[in-house]
């Protein structure tokens, strides 16, 4: 009889080791060690001149070792195709360090043995690249290029320079329980036939692959060279503009990591990311006195390079590719549904939809992943509204926790306690409020515009309006509470004269969300079957919302128009015109239709004037003109007097008539509309935004 053996269950692998946050390393290297091409040339040189001999004029300027050849011409001069001369007098030794803000700082004198020492990299302390001094990318640290980098990104999961990762989901052929049996090193990695597997939690794994394993038709060096050729010497100034105008309210880049790499001469940036940052910064080209006097770089060429290089970069999933795509989508002309869907898939490939709070990755990367995940979430939801498509991110598969103030810390060193600039703090608050608003807007789309909802309203028949109102009340209360709790720094009147203020796109998103609710209510109304009082109430509330939205556009100041606007702003302004056109087309009487026609004409004039200051408004103006052109085919409407005489037009009922309506089961929802301001949009309910400071 065969013996029966008890099979012990697989013991769970201990939790992965936590990877310590990156700490800056000291790098003291000679020029020949920093430039591989030069090092190779020097190693191949047959003749090396003794140190006691003086260097040539070119090598002295470059502060590089001078290596003579048999031809009595040094390697570097021959490499740069220049004359090798020995005529200039040696200058006094006085080494200077060009800080990241463009100013030259004298290197600190040697300290006594008892004095505390400081890493020379601390001289690079300012986080800004000013537009006043356009510093070429190859002249950032001293007078030579330093390409040996700190290990900041190399300790990360999704930002490594020569590797990329892919998330291994729970239903793949690689079971997490089987992976856990393997032998892992100190980096929580183990080799396998499908790539190096990296563990981030007890049950979550990624497969990491060398970039060289994915052949691509082009290389990053060529794309970067084309970008540099297009931008010229204005790159540092544009980077400064980006971090000053875009980054505060759209913080999807780890600023200090980026600037640290730039200060160390790293030229291995993701080409589409760098191009996208330049493209957004070019919007403020004419506002910078030092740039406005120069010809503006070719925007079309830069955009072409960004899009083509992004297509290549997406073959190697990294955070930088998602960042590049999101920044490109902030440009109205580049915002496409196809690219949005690709970015959602790319984000899921690197696990942005997961909660990374306890992952064994650097803390700064966990914070960056959370911000980037919510930026991707907002991109998906607002794109769905803008294009009228189904969202690709659903709540059942979204595990990312809401961001906190701590998640906006840009520092790499966990012991660093930097005091945030008030504008930076304001941008962070704006970003978190936009996330909250987006969640409400997504609920509006799912409640009123999903295919399931549309079918339910169609089956409801004459009760469709009642069904819409019943479902509108809860989400309307959420929207009302969100607006009532807006922080002071997010109010429209909280700007400083002469200083750009980006809160406009948040309030515009609020109006777009409200309009999307009322738009569905108006669409459900059937004058032939609707109760006269319900028709009156719903159209009055819609009229109030439209007037408030149009007044918002009229009150935009230059400080608002010149600031950063979220990509959906063009579509959201266009929705105001679309809603006005819908109310005009469905107006029961000629007088009401003429009122909306005059307000649409005023909106058109306002957009034409504002578009001179904010070119992104041009797209909204085109959509408004298209709607007004379609309204030209609207049949002539009867006046109110004619309707009363021939058709008994619906008028507000008397108090006795209202009581009779409330007794009807079909209209019971009307009795709930005024209880807590759910659907009653009169000025007395506190929802009107005519007073921005309320």
Image (cartoon, rainbow, N blue to C red):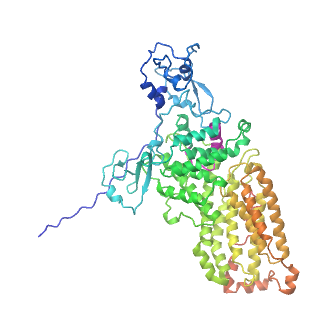
Whether residue 369 is visible to the viewer of this picture, yes or no, is yes
Tell me the residue at 29%/57% (across/down): 11
Residue 90 image position (x, y, % from top left): 56, 14
Location of residue 608 (image quadrant):
bottom right
Say if 267 sits above or below 72 in the image: below
Say if 243 sits above or below 73 in the image: below
Locate residue 413 relative to residue 389 in the image: left or right: left
Magenta span of residues: 234-254
Number of residue marks: 0
Residue 238 lies in the magenta-colored region = yes
Which residue appears farthest toward the front when viewing the image?
71
Q: Along the line of sight, which residue is nearer the eye, 613 or 303? A: 303
Which residue appears farthest toward the left when viewing the image?
1
Say if 31 sits above or below 495 in the image: above
Quarter in which the N terminus is drawn: bottom left
Residue 523 image position (x, y, % from top left): 70, 75
Location of residue 458 (image quadrant):
bottom right
Whether residue 29 is visible to the viewer of this picture, yes or no, is no
Tell me the residue at 53%/48% (across/down): 320
Residue 322 image position (x, y, % from top left): 54, 52
Q: Along the line of sight, which residue is nearer the eye, 485 or 256? A: 256
Locate residue 400 relative to residue 194 in the image: left or right: right
Tell me the residue at 78%/57% (across/down): 607
Q: Along the line of sight, which residue is nearer the eye, 540 or 621? A: 621
Residue 629 lies in the magenta-colored region = no
Residue 660 image position (x, y, % from top left): 74, 87
Tell me the residue at 76%/72% (across/down): 583
Location of residue 130 (image quadrant):
top right
Q: Along the line of sight, which residue is nearer the eye, 385 or 273? A: 273
Quarter in which the C terminus is drawn: bottom right
């Amino acid at each position: 009889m065969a013996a029966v053996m008890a099979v012990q269950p697989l013991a769970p692998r201990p939790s992965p080791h936590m990877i310590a946050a990156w700490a800056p390393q000291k790098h003291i290297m000679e020029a020949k060690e920093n430039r591989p091409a030069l090092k190779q040339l020097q190693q191949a040189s047959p003749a090396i001149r003794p140190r006691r001999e003086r260097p040539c004029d070119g090598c002295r300027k470059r502060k590089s070792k001078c290596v003579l050849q048999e031809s009595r011409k040094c390697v570097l001069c021959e490499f740069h195709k220049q004359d090798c001369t020995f005529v200039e007098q040696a200058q006094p030794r006085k080494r200077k360090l060009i800080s990241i803000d463009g100013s030259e700082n004298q290197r600190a004198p040697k300290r006594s043995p008892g004095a505390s020492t400081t890493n020379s990299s601390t001289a690079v302390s300012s986080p800004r690249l000013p537009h006043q001094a356009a510093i070429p990318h190859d002249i950032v640290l001293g007078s030579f290029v330093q390409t040996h980098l700190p290990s900041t990104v190399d300790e990360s999961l999704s930002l490594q320079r020569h590797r990329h990762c892919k998330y291994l989901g729970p239903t793949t052929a690689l079971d997490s329980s089987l992976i856990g049996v393997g032998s892992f090193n100190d980096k929580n990695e183990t080799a396998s036939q499908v790539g190096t597997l990296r563990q981030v939690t007890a049950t979550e794994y990624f497969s990491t692959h060398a970039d060289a394993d994915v052949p691509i038709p082009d290389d990053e060096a060529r794309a970067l060279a084309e970008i540099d050729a297009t931008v010229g010497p204005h790159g540092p100034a544009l980077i400064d503009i980006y971090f000053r105008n875009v980054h505060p309210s759209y913080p999807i880049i780890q600023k200090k990591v980026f600037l640290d790499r730039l200060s160390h001469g790293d030229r291995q940036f993701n080409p589409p990311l760098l191009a996208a940052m330049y493209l957004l910064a070019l919007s403020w080209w004419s506002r910078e006195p030092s740039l406005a006097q120069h010809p503006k770089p070719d925007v079309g060429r830069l955009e072409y390079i960004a899009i083509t290089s992004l297509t290549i970069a997406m073959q190697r999933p990294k955070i930088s590719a998602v960042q590049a795509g999101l920044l490109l989508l902030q440009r109205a002309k580049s915002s496409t549904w196809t690219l949005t869907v690709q970015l959602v898939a790319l984000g899921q490939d690197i696990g942005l939809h997961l909660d990374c709070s306890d992952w064994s990755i650097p803390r700064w990367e966990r914070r960056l992943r959370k911000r980037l995940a919510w930026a991707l979430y907002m991109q998906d939801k607002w794109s769905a509204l803008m294009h009228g498509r189904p969202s690709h991110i659903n709540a059942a598969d979204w595990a990312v926790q809401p961001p906190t103030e701590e998640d906006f810390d840009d520092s790499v060193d966990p012991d660093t306690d930097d005091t945030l600039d008030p504008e930076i703090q304001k941008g962070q608050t704006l970003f978190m409020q936009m996330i909250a608003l987006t969640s409400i807007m997504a609920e509006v789309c799912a409640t009123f515009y999903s295919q399931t909802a549309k079918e339910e309203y169609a089956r409801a028949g004459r009760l469709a309006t009642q069904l819409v109102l019943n479902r509108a009340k809860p989400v309307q209360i959420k929207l009302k509470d969100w607006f009532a709790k807006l922080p002071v720094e997010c109010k429209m009147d909280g700007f400083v004269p002469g200083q750009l203020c980006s809160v406009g796109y948040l309030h515009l998103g609020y109006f777009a969300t409200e309009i999307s609710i009322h738009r569905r209510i108006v669409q459900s109304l059937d004058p032939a079957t609707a109760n006269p009082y319900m028709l009156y109430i719903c159209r009055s509330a819609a009229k109030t919302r439209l007037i408030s939205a149009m007044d918002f556009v009229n009150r935009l100041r230059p400080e608002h128009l010149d600031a950063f606007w979220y990509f959906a702003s063009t579509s959201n302004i266009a929705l105001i015109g679309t809603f006005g056109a819908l109310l005009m087309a469905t107006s029961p009487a000629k007088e009401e239709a003429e009122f909306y026609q005059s307000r649409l004409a005023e909106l058109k004039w306002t957009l034409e004037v504002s578009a001179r200051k904010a070119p992104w408004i041009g797209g909204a103006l085109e959509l408004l003109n298209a709607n007004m052109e379609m309204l030209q085919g609207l049949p002539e409407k009867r006046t109110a007097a004619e309707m009363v005489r021939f058709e008994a037009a619906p008028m507000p009922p008397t108090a006795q008539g209202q009581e009779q309506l409330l007794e009807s089961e079909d209209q019971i929802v009307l009795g709930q509309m005024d209880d807590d301001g759910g659907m009653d949009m009169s000025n007395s309910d506190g929802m009107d935004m005519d007073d921005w400071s309320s």
